[in-house]
Image: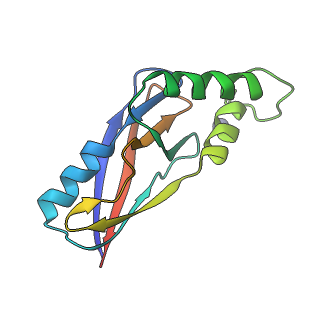
């Protein structure tokens, strides 16, 4: 296994950043050909998912509906004031696995890897493991 990490600087409390190209760059530079690319987010208020990278409105709709379903203010007990961020992160998930063949991630035509910030702005880390 080869382990890499990238930094993601977020600029808003809630934000989705497409990190597909950054991860493909790591695969290209490592000359990794065939196997699995595992992506892990080691944070409790950010996550990673795969969804459409073509229409930017999909990201906006995604954040809007999460905001409606999980309001920032409620009768939460957690004193940090970011209970909604923790719930959103767990619903999104903290890892993804993508198959790599001939040096390319086998994502669908419209798919991209979304880094999901729910308690920014912050400097975040994403771990990438390449497994043969
Ligand atoms: Zn918290």
* Quadrant in the picture for residue 89: top right
Residue at x-position 50% and y-position 57%: 95
* Residue sitting farthest toward the right: 75
The spot of residue 126 in percent (x, y) is 38, 50
The spot of residue 21 in percent (x, y) is 25, 43
Direction from residue 69 to residue 99 in the image, left or right: left
Residue at x-position 87% and y-position 26%: 75
Direction from residue 51 to residue 2 in the image, left or right: left
Residue at x-position 52% and y-position 47%: 43
* Residue sitting farthest toward the bottom: 132
The spot of residue 71 in percent (x, y) is 75, 23
Q: Report the image quarter containing ligand 1.
A: top right
Q: How is the image coloured?
A: rainbow
Q: Is residue 46 above or below residue 99?
A: above
The spot of residue 38 in percent (x, y) is 40, 63
Q: Is residue 27 above or below residue 68?
A: below
Residue at x-position 24% and y-position 52%: 24
**Which quarter shows the N terminus?**
bottom left
Direction from residue 116 to residue 127 in the image, left or right: left
* Quadrant in the picture for residue 27: bottom left
Q: Is residue 45 above or below residue 11?
A: below
């Amino acid at each position: 296994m080869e382990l890499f990490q990238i930094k993601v600087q977020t600029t808003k409390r809630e934000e989705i950043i497409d990190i597909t190209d950054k991860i493909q760059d790591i695969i290209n530079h490592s000359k990794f050909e065939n196997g699995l690319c595992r992506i892990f987010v080691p944070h409790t208020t950010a996550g990673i998912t795969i969804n459409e990278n073509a229409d930017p409105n999909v990201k906006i709709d995604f954040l809007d509906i999460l905001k409606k379903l999980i309001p920032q203010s409620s009768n939460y007990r957690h004193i940090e004031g970011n209970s909604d961020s923790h719930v959103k992160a767990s619903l999104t998930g903290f890892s993804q696995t993508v198959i790599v063949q001939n040096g390319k991630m086998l994502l669908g035509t419209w798919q991209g890897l979304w880094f999901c910030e729910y308690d920014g702005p912050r400097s975040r880390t994403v771990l990438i493991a390449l497994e043969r």
